Amino acid sequence: MCKLGLNQSSFKNDELQARMEELLERKKADLLTLEEVIELEEIGEINRIFTHINAMLVAQ
């Protein structure tokens, strides 16, 4: 536990992960709309932010 009372998995979101996987499957099939391309990029950015936050929490 960190000072905030959160563990490393606190920043994981199952729905967000599921949506990312769905979009990646659609991307593999070359079925993404322009809006979905943007959404996938945004989810990737959120994932990078959460990974960074989790790394900082673990380092504490």
Image (spheres, helix red, strand yellow):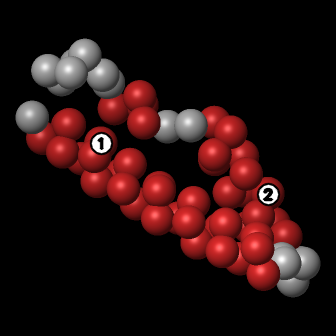
Q: How many neighbours does mark 1 have within 10 angstroms: few (below 14), some (14-19), or many (20 or more)? A: some
In this view, the residue farthest toward the left is: 60
Q: Report which quarter residue 29 is drawn in.
A: bottom right
Of the residues shown, which amino acid type is indicated by label 1? Asn
- Mark 1 = which residue? 54
In this rendering, does residue 28 appear at all?
no
Marks 2 and 1 in Cβ contact (< 8 Å) = no
Percent across and percent down for residue 57 are 20, 37
Residue 22 visible in the displayed image: yes
Relative image position of residue 5 (x, y in whole percent): 25, 16
| Quadrant of the rendering where the N terminus is positioned | top left
Picture quadrant where residue 34 is located:
bottom right
Q: Is residue 2 above or below residue 56?
A: above
* Residue under numbered circle 2: 22
Residue located 71% across and 76% down the image: 37
* Front residue of 30 and 34: 34
Of the residues under marks 2 and 1, which one precedes in the sequence? Answer: 2
Q: How many discs appear? A: 2
Secondary structure beneath label 2: helix
Residue 35 relative to residue 30: left or right: left
Q: Residues within 10 Å of mark 2 (few under 14, many from 20)?
A: few
Above or below residue 51? Residue 6 is: above
Q: Secondary structure at mark 1?
A: helix
Q: Quadrant of the C terminus?
A: top left
